[in-house]
Amino acid sequence: MFSLTILTYRGLYAEMECSSVNLPTPDGRWGILPNRMPIMLPISIGIMYVRTADGEKKYTVDGGIFYIENNVATLLIEEIEDVENIDIERARKAQHNAEERIRNAQTEYDISRARIALQKAINRINAKETF
């Protein structure tokens, strides 16, 4: 087991003891197990799986940094949401709004922001539908 602390810009999200964590990164998925060498990973928009003594938990994550050393891991994340708590209708509305923003965008900056919002909404929908 190793300890995992999850922090957002709002503060402490959770602390838990894990037997594994599976993370989305720009290079693909990374599985983290106890007693591994230190590593720092960038985190992409995607689904994170955490295995604890109570079973597996599934979270949507929206970019950040993961670091582990000496069986102590820290996840600094922009946004995280337990898949059990996702409101699918709200996620579908966010998808629709992001698609509308892409159609009506005036600048590349507006398009980029809307595409990120669309990715996040689709990630939440996919996570909930496969839960």
Image: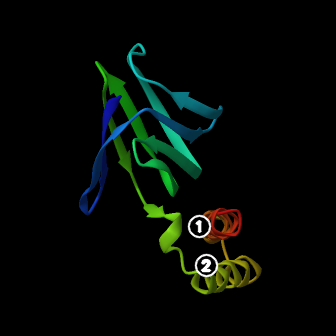
In the rendered image, the vertical position of residue 53 relative to residue 39, given as above or below:
below
In the rendered image, the vertical position of residue 52 relative to residue 67, given as above or below:
below
Q: Residue at x 46, y 63 (%)?
A: 82
Which quadrant of the figure has residue 129?
bottom right
Q: Tell me the crowding category of disc 2: few under 14, some 14 to 19, or many 20 or more residues within 10 angstroms, Cα based.
A: many
- Label 1 sits on residue: 113
Quadrant containing the N terminus in the rendered view: top left
Name the residue type under label 1.
Arg
Q: Tell me the crowding category of disc 1: few under 14, some 14 to 19, or many 20 or more residues within 10 angstroms, Cα based.
A: some
Alpha-carbon distance for marks 2 and 1? 16 Å
- Label 2 sits on residue: 91
Q: Residue at x 58, y 85 (%)?
A: 90
Q: Residue furthest top?
A: 37
Is 43 situated left or right of 77 in this image? right
Residue 37 point in image, percent of width and height: 41, 13
In the rendered image, the vertical position of residue 90 relative to residue 17, given as above or below:
below
| Depth check, front residue: 56 or 128 | 56
| Depth check, front residue: 61 or 99 | 61
Q: Residue furthest left?
A: 11
Q: Residue at x 47, y 25 (%)?
A: 33
Which quadrant of the figure has residue 107?
bottom right
* First reached walking from the N terminus: tag 2 or tag 1: 2
